[in-house]
Image: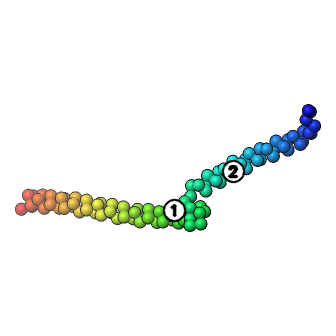
Amino acid sequence: MSDTRCDACAANEALIIALDQRVQVMEHSCIRMKEAFVKNDLGLPDYDGHRTDHKHRKEEAQVVEGYKRDVTKNILLGLALFVAGLLSSGLKEWLSTHIK
């Protein structure tokens, strides 16, 4: 049997086959993405719950970051007071030995 199609028809068929393959890849990707989400009470992917979870995690991270900043400030203040105490006791001793 000989192929009686014209070149344009063969090119169009090749384009359609390539397009079908690309659509299959996109459908597969969509299915895989839907599998990544937990299901809601309707059995559908819970996109809103996922978004809300990210929002809560971001808020928690900001709170923890604030605590870290406060603790660091307190530690640095404590160290500064300790060093100031050491220096002041040394200054008292230096003054007592040099000024009589």
Q: Position of residue 51 (x, y in %)?
A: 55, 64
Q: Quadrant of the N terminus?
A: top right
Crowding at dot 2, Cα within 10 Å, few <14 / some 14-19 / many 20+, comes out as: few
Quadrant into which the C terminus falls: bottom left
Q: Nearer the viewer, residue 80 or 90?
A: 80
Residue at left offset 19%, top offset 59%? 87
Q: Where is residue 58 shown, x and y percent of the image?
A: 48, 63
Kind of element beneath mark 1? helix
Work out whether mark 2 precedes mark 1 in sequence or the reverse, and give the earlier one.
2
Can you identify the residue that label 2 sits on? 26
Q: Position of residue 41 (x, y in %)?
A: 56, 67
Q: Is label 2 in contact with label 1 (beta carbons under 8 Å)?
A: no
**Residue count near mark 1 (Cα–Cα under 10 Å), binned few <14, some 14–19, many ≥20:** few
Q: Residue furthest left?
A: 100
Quarter-wise, where is residue 5 in the image? Answer: top right
**Any part of residue 62 in sight:** no
Residue at 69% x, 51% y: name it: 26
Q: Is residue 3 left or right of residue 63?
A: right
Which secondary structure lies at badge 2?
helix
Task: Confirm whether residue 11 shows in the render.
Answer: yes
User: Which residue is drawn at the image coordinates 54% and 65% (left, top)?
Assistant: 49
Q: Which mark is residue 28?
A: none
Q: Amino acid at mark 2?
A: Met
Left or right relative to 23: residue 11: right
| Mark number, residue 54 | 1
Q: Is residue 6 above or below residue 69?
A: above
CA–CA distance in space, label 2 to label 1? 26 Å
